[in-house]
Image (spheres, rainbow, N blue to C red):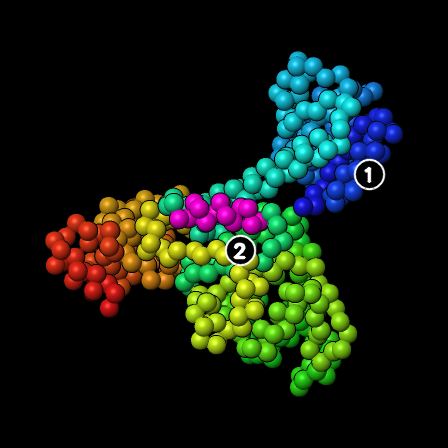
Amino acid sequence: MSATILVVDDDASLRRAVRDRVAHWGHVVEDVANGAAALAAVDRREFDLVILDLWMPGMSGLEVLARLHATTPDTDVLVLTAHGSVDVAVEAIRAGATDFLQKPAEFELLRTRVDAILERRRGRRFAAHVAESRDGATGGLVACTPAMKSLLETATKAAKSDAVVLITGESGVGKQVLAEAIHAASPRRAGPFVYVNCVALSDDLVESTLFGHEKGAFTGAIARKLGRLEMAQGGTAFLDEIGDTSERFQTKLLHFLETGEYERVGGTKTLRADCRVLAATNKDLKRAVDAGAFRADLYYRLDVIHLEIPPLRERPADVLPLVDSFLRRFAHEQGRNPPRLSEETERRLASHAWPGNVRELRNVIERMVVLGTGDVLTADLLPSSMHDGAATQTGRASDALPFAESVEAFKRERI
């Protein structure tokens, strides 16, 4: 779980010892001898954690801490000091320190504290990405229902590892949004997020797209082309619609997942790529395996962590919060204040079945914001398919009807 860490201490021998030990734990470490150098280092690059001595000549650790808290409040700071006391600890925490440890600290205790800080940091990043999506920046990761809350809790844990994640769900539920959130909260977040749509390409082209090809590998291959795996070095490769690929491609992908090795199309040289793989599909891969349409060994290799996003009709409590996030997003793009919904508009949005899931909802709200000119969006701005109330009722709306009418409303919605 690599992180970037800055060690600040005027004691050269102790500073080197901490630097070397933290580097041994797999982190990228930089060390400096005083507060001014620490602030200069933070100006140059972003650090996940600063391990800071409090008592240094010139600028004290508390002064450095105050400056860091004012300029880069997201940076975590672990204070190390030989002059430990309750008063000093309280002062450091008030100044913005994340944790406090007294010298001489045993390295295993230091490692425990560092790991705990970094784990909480990754959790905050994921939560921030979810919150950003609620504001409409990416859209789709709204969790008001227990099913979505549980899903995001699992995704937060999955983001901390390099394990393969299989994301399933109907078209439009937000599979790519969830994949981007996992990447953004992972230790690979500084690397690229590379998208591959497996269903939009022929068998030959999807292999060439993912693995690359050599010059002359096939007609039209006039030069060597790097594959998406190479482009995703140090980051994440997201393979969308993995259930629609050929058996030949599945065999090559399985080999890469097992070994990290692959060959460009038309090439003989074995290459390696250090990237994490996330995959998504709207198909039932287990059923495809049983039918012989998908390799069982690849399925079990992809299904290390399985995240299934429920359709929007199964989480009606998320509809209006999503509406709110999209209203703010598209109003901002239009340079206007977010409009309100009339009661009738809100009722129809809440009772619609949303067969196109979050994507359909997003498009409806964008249409209404673009076409609406007032502060209130009325029901006449909804698409014509939503003007027939009987066709838009979900189980939640039909629950209030007598039994026979409820059954008929359900049948009508399904048809």
Residue 40 lies, with reference to residue 367, above or below; the image says: above
Question: What is the three-letter code of the residue carrying label 1?
Answer: Asp
Q: Which mark is residue 235?
A: none
Percent of width and height locating residue 392: 24, 59
Mark 1, residue position: 20
Instruction: Answer few, some or many: residues within 10 Å of disc 2's Cα (few below 14, many 20 plus, some between 14 and 19).
Output: some
Is 406 positioned to the left or the right of 248 in the image? left
Q: Which residues are magenta?
A: 147-159
Is 285 positioned to the left or the right of 345 in the image? right
Q: Main secondary structure of the magenta part?
A: helix
Q: How many tags in the picture? A: 2
Mark 2, residue position: 305
Percent of width and height locating residue 223: 73, 78
* Residue 210 or residue 258, whichever sits in front: 258
- Residue 413 visible in image: yes
Q: Residue at x 81, y 21 (%)?
A: 56
Is 243 positioned to the left or the right of 371 in the image? right
Query: Which circle, 1 or 2, is nearer the viewer?
Result: 2
Quarter of image, res 145: top left
Q: Residue at x 32, y 56 (%)?
A: 313
Residue 204 lies, with reference to residue 368, above or below; the image says: below
Quarter of image, res 384: bottom left
Circle nearer the N terminus (1, 2): 1
Q: Residue at x 36, y 48 (%)?
A: 318
Quarter of image, res 13: top right
